[in-house]
Structure formats: C-alpha cells, structure tokens
Amino acid sequence: MSFNKDRVMQELQRFGGAMYTPVILFAFFGLTVALSIIFSNTGLFGSLAEKGTLWYDFWYVVQQGAWTVFNQMPILFAIAVPIGFAKKEQARCAMEGFVIYMVFNYFIAGILTLHGSYFGVDYSQDAGAGTGLAMIANIKTLDMGMLGAIFIACISAYLHNRFYDTEIPDWLGIFKGPAFVVAVGFLVMLPMALLFCYIWPPIQHGIEQFQFFLKTSGIFGVWAYTFSERILLPAGLHHFIYLPFIYGPAVCDGGIQAYWLQHLNDFATSAHSLRDMFPQGGFALHGSAKVFGLPGAALAMYYCAKPEKRKKVATLCSFRLRLQPSSAALPNRLNLPSCSSPRSSMSSMPS
C-alpha cells in the first residue's frame, strides 16, 4: 500500500474538522459566563449586585447554566466528534458515541474498584485535581480529560461506519443499526478499558511531567507551548496541546478559561499586577499569533500564488491587513471577547 500524502492530509484535516464541532459552542457559553460575572460585580453595579438581591439571584442562575459546556467537556466531545466522522446517520452516530463512552467509563470504574492497587491507582480517594481520577456523568474513572473522550469517539465513529449497515437475520432485526453498533462497541470497550487501566497511569505521568516542564520553564516554556500549538495547527492536532491548558487542569484546576472567569472580580478590584496574580494566563497568549501572524500569512500566500495572480493576491491581502486594526478587537470565534480574556489583559509572560 503506497503512501498518499494528500490522502493523509485530507484525513488529518477531517479530524481537525471533527474536533471543531464541539468547539463552536465555546463562544456563546464563554460570553454568557463572562456577562453573568460582570453583572454580578458589585464594583460595577453596587448594591444591586449584592448577594440576596433579585438581580444577583438571576445572574447566579444564568452563570450556573453557562458553565454547562465547560463542566461537561469530555461528554461533549464524546457526542460531537463522531458527527464529524460519520458517513451517514450522524445523529445516531452521536448517540452511539455517548453510550459507548459511558460503557468504557463504567468498565474502568468496575476494574479499578476491584483491582485499583494493581494498576497503581488509589481508587478509594475522591476524584479531583492531582488524584488521576475524575467524575464523568457521576462515574469515578481515570482522568483522561478530552483525550480519552476523543479517542473513544473516534473508535465509535469507526464502528458506526463499519457495522451500521451490517446484514443480520430477520429474527434478530431488533439488533440492527444502532443497537448492533453499540453491541459491538460494548465488546470492544471491555478489553479497551483493561488496556487503558494498564497504560494510562504511566501516560498520565508523562503528560504531567511535560506540562510541568512547560509551566516551570518561564519564557521558554511558553514559547515551546505556543510553537507546538502553532506547528500542529495545519493538521488539526493543535487541540491536543491547548485543550489541557485552556480547558483542562494542566496549569490550574479547571483550565485557564474557567479560572479567569471565576476570578474576574478579584482581578478587576485588586491593585496587584495581573502577572503576579495569574501568571498561568500567559499560556493563553498563543492567540496573539492570530493577529501578528497575518502579515506572514499574507506574504506566504503572495509567494505561493502563480506569478500572473500575485498582483491580485497582493491587493486582497493588503485590503485585509488594512482591516486588521479595526477587527483585532472583535471576539475570536472560539474565545471570549477581548475585554474579558487574559490574552488581551496579560501585560507580560510568566517569568
């Protein structure tokens, strides 16, 4: 079988597109969280925003609902990623992905309940940051974050595309379609759960060591993180770099995005430097490449264009770059508005 570079790139880009499916929800929910926190700020709204008032109670309830996507990230990816891979019946593929992901976590919980110590996991402790355990839909399981959910979602999509149209005897017709896919997924998840109980604790340790290196290496760590995120962008694999930092526990519990929003009032009312209060926010500065990288992208498009087309390309790129200063303050499609994002407020990198 010959290696087809275009085919590989196409599949990687398809993977990136599938990863983007759940990410499109972040903008609305992030904006809603930010607004609910702002409207609950007594520094801005005085006594109206104090606890016990109807105004505070309303925005408190709104904020709890706005955390839905960020609190249920693995489940969201387990449901949404298969939609991007399914060749047919995308809605049913999403349901199958959710069920198979839950089966996977229940199998892990059962294995660790009986033999957690054998795998080097203290399953008796409460799930939380630093324990290696997490609660997924009220299931105490290995803390694999979005990576585990994405991996199982990809397997679910493969099983859907492979077995959804499998012909079975008429007397077993009730097991046709989604039921058959889930049944196959059930059988596949049992050895898969056992495998992850073996391999994930060492992998998790390695990931923690790499993240520790990034967050303790000062400017070089931020550079290595940003470079890794940018270099993997064309293949859509940059999600594996930034997700644990922005939405996971890599540098602060709950992720940079959630931590920023939860402490927005403290940052707004404190006289201390934001660099001192929230140095982890420096890792969110990789978004600056979307502004400062435009001239380089325009130059690359100009030189890659056919000689007879370069004049037109130069005109189009020049027009876009003139719009850049006015558009730089607009919300990025995946992030919060610049007025409430650490990317625009961080005055310097972590030292």
Image (cartoon, helix red, strand yellow):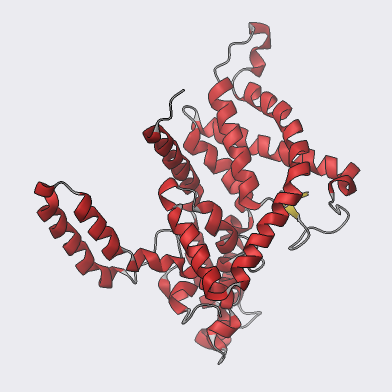
Count of marks, rendered view: 0
Q: Which residue shows up at 69% across the image and 55% down it?
A: 206
- Hey, which quadrant is residue 104 in on the image? top right
Residue farthest to the top, as pictured? 170
Q: Which residue shows up at 88% across the image and 45% down it?
A: 118
Q: Is residue 134 left or right of residue 149?
A: right
Residue sitting nearer the eye, 28 or 243: 243
Residue 144, position as x, y percentages in the image:
68, 50
Residue 163, position as x, y percentages in the image:
58, 21
Residue sitting nearer the eye, 131 or 128: 131
- Hey, which quadrant is residue 65 in on the image? bottom right
Q: Is residue 186 visible?
A: yes
The C terminus sits in image quarter: bottom right
Does 86 sit above or below residue 274? above
Q: Is residue 55 visible?
A: no
- Hey, which quadrant is residue 126 in on the image? bottom right
Q: Which residue shows up at 79% across the image and 58% down it?
A: 127
Does 311 sit above or below residue 259? above
Residue farthest to the bottom, as pictured? 271
Residue 194, position as x, y percentages in the image:
78, 37
Q: Which residue shows up at 47% across the image and 46% down it?
A: 21
Does 272 sit above or below residue 187? below
Residue sitting nearer the eye, 306 or 280: 306
Q: Is residue 296 left or right of residue 48?
A: left
Residue farthest to the front, as pictured? 2
Residue 282, position as x, y percentages in the image:
52, 73
